Image (cartoon, helix red, strand yellow):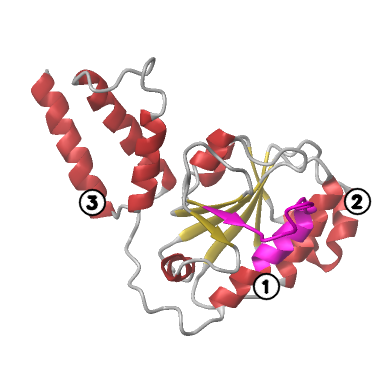
Amino acid sequence: MIKKNNIDIEFILVEPSHPGNIGACARAIKNMGFKKLALVNPRKKINEEAFHRAKGAKDILENAVIFDSFDLAINEKNLILATSARKRTIQWPTYFVDNISDEIKSQMKSEMIKTGIVFGREDNGLSNEELQKCHYHLIIPANEEYSSLNLSHALQIVAFEIRKIIFDDEINKIEVRDVVSNQENEKLLEHLMEVLKKIDFYDPKSSKQVKTRIDRLIKKSRLDKMEMGILRGFLSKIIDFEK
């Protein structure tokens, strides 16, 4: 198992439909030395087939955490990476899985960071809303004519690339800040939208992309706890002044 510091990396499967795939993913996770598997609303329970496909990784299945919603699965994460090849109207920061930035690599190796690696449904991947809640998107550079990968195969590739990052001793050169969790970012977004409505800058009916673009800006900023406190205090003062 990977024992470098207290590295916290969890692989999150959103609504997996096939127990066999869940078991194969557990095996892939253990193959690469990781421990943590989370499931969001699995369509079928972990069954005998899942344990059969997991082979020697039965402990990964036994300790898998099941969440009722995507938001609950990512709430406590400081770094959320979504695997997706989907093109979007509003572009999100995206990397090939074998070419992740040094900053993100440093964050994944930090004891201060809780990382979630998100994989979508076997049939249609992650929704746009789910993708927008992640900090970065990862793409596996597959054949454009046939880029669809089995869920466990995709996870194996990503886990392999992350394993290489964890054991690369040249990476810890960037100072990692105590960045806030996804839940704190969501609260800031709602606070900011409340203020924008009060000052008549934002109308949800006519400015549909404003909230999405501000959300992207917040996630790109990777705020630390002190910066978050300053912004929340500033917004509270504006609301008090408007009263």
- Label 2, secondary structure: give it: helix
Question: Residue at (26%, 20%) from the top-left corner?
Answer: 197
Type of amino acid at the residue the image marks with label 2: Glu
From the image, tell me which residue sits under label 1.
33
Which numbered circle lies on residue 49?
2
**Is residue 153 something that shows in the picture?**
yes
Q: Alpha carbon of mark 3 to alpha carbon of mark 2: how far?
A: 48 Å
Looking at the image, is 55 positioned above or below residue 121?
A: below
Disc nearer the start of the sequence (2/1):
1
Quarter of the image with the C terminus in it: top left
Type of amino acid at the residue the image marks with label 3: Glu
Q: State yes or no: discs 3 and 1 in contact (Cβ < 8 Å).
A: no
Question: Residue at (56%, 44%) from the top-left corner?
Answer: 73
Type of amino acid at the residue the image marks with label 1: Gly
Disc nearer the start of the sequence (3/1):
1
Q: Position of residue 171 (x, y in %)?
A: 45, 79
Q: Alpha carbon of mark 3 to alpha carbon of mark 1: how far?
A: 35 Å
| Relative horizontal placement of residue 238, taking residue 101 as reference (left or right) | left
Which numbered circle lies on residue 227?
3
| Residues rendered magenta in the picture | 137-159
Residue projecting furthest to the top: 205
